[in-house]
Image (tube, grey):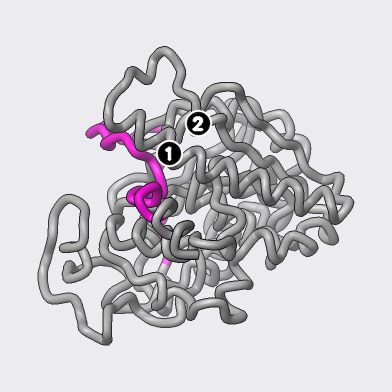
Amino acid sequence: MGVAVALLAPLAVALSDVAPRVAAAPNPAGFDFWVDSPEMGPIRSRVFRAKDGNTNRVVYALDGMRAPETHSGWENDTNIANALTDWNINVVMPIGGMSSFYTDWNAPSSFVGLPPTGSSSGSGALNVISEGPGKSYRYAWETFINQHLRWALNSRLGFNPNRNGVFGLSMGGSGALTLAAYHPDQFSFAGSYSGYLNISAPGMREGIRAGMIDAGGYNVDSMAPPWGPQWLRMDPFVFAPLLRDHNTRLWISAGSALPGPADGFNGNTINGMGLEALALVNTRAFQVRMMTLGANNVTYSFPATGIHSWTYWEAEVYRMLPDLSANIG
């Protein structure tokens, strides 16, 4: 166990996109959609309407571990909103949720009960004393997406609340499968790119602990106590039978951890290779689990090149699009 922790923790320094976000302008096709959460206050999402104007086909795109309060990485670093809307799919991008795993937390994030006392910039252990979302209140992202956002989209925009799709990268991939597993009436399709789908494997909790400290200074123990029902409930490897039994259409992907020619050879590439190797091991374990369960509702995509970066996740959306389109609405 100690060896596993030593190997995994350094790889978990940033369990999401590894390249710095660029200061991109918002996509003018999208608009802000605010919804109140009783636990978290007003939460903003970005909405992109389907090209043909339908309200029946809806997909949620979830961000990674460093999800900021400004715009989703999907809008900031990719062009997938335009691709999806061209396929006549409405796109919803919830904003925020850094280190949240899009789940309902046990308590506000804190260390030994201490409240946040200041601000910190950059990454690293100093983030544990910084203020931030989910520290003065309890994260309740699963409830927000399943109840408050879902029904606000229905009542105010007429969006279909059933047979939606959901996908995400890294942390968001794990969150997408969790949402689909426990809310099959809302989600008929779920996609995970480079997700951590075997979080109870040896060393994974401590790897996630290190990643959450680096990504905003969050405490994994505030999310879910170790190895209890709440933790196991959010482990895709554990709840895999639900996805099989609901016949949820799944798209499960991870790269080979080998960089492509455009990646260059620098610190971001090396970090992205390590992170993707970890995601690949997790994703392959989930694949074996589903195969032993006799599940035939999954498409697996394991490209020959691909590290933990937006370039490869954007490409994966294009590969997934026909399957997504055929299984929502």
Where 313 sits versus 169, above or below?
above
| 110 within the magenta span | no
Q: Which residues are magenta?
A: 9-35
Q: Quadrant of residue 5?
A: bottom left
In-front residue for pair 183/288: 288
- Residue where numbered disc 1 is placed: 274
> Is residue 5 toward the left or the right of residue 60 in the image?
left
> Is residue 319 toward the left or the right of residue 220 in the image?
right
Q: Quadrant of residue 139?
A: bottom left
Distance, label 1 to label 2, CA atoms, is 7 Å
Residue that protrudes farthest toward the right in the picture: 294
Residue 33 is situated, as x and y percent measured from the top left of the image, at 41, 54
Three-letter code for the amino acid on which mark 2 is drawn: Ala
Q: Say which mark, if any, is on residue 235.
A: none
Residue 257 is situated, as x and y percent measured from the top left of the image, at 50, 31
Where 195 sits versus 214, above or below?
above
Three-letter code for the amino acid on which mark 1 is drawn: Gly
Q: Are marks 1 and 2 in contact (CB under 8 Å)?
A: yes
Q: Is residue 226 visible?
A: yes
Which residue: 44% across, 64% down?
2
Which residue: 46% across, 73% down?
140
> Is residue 47 toward the left or the right of residue 177 in the image?
left
Q: Secondary structure at mark 2?
A: loop
Q: Earlier in the sequence, mark 1 or mark 2?
A: 2
Residue 74 is situated, as x and y percent measured from the top left of the image, at 43, 38
| 19 within the magenta span | yes
- Residue where numbered disc 2 is placed: 257
Q: Is residue 100 visible?
A: no
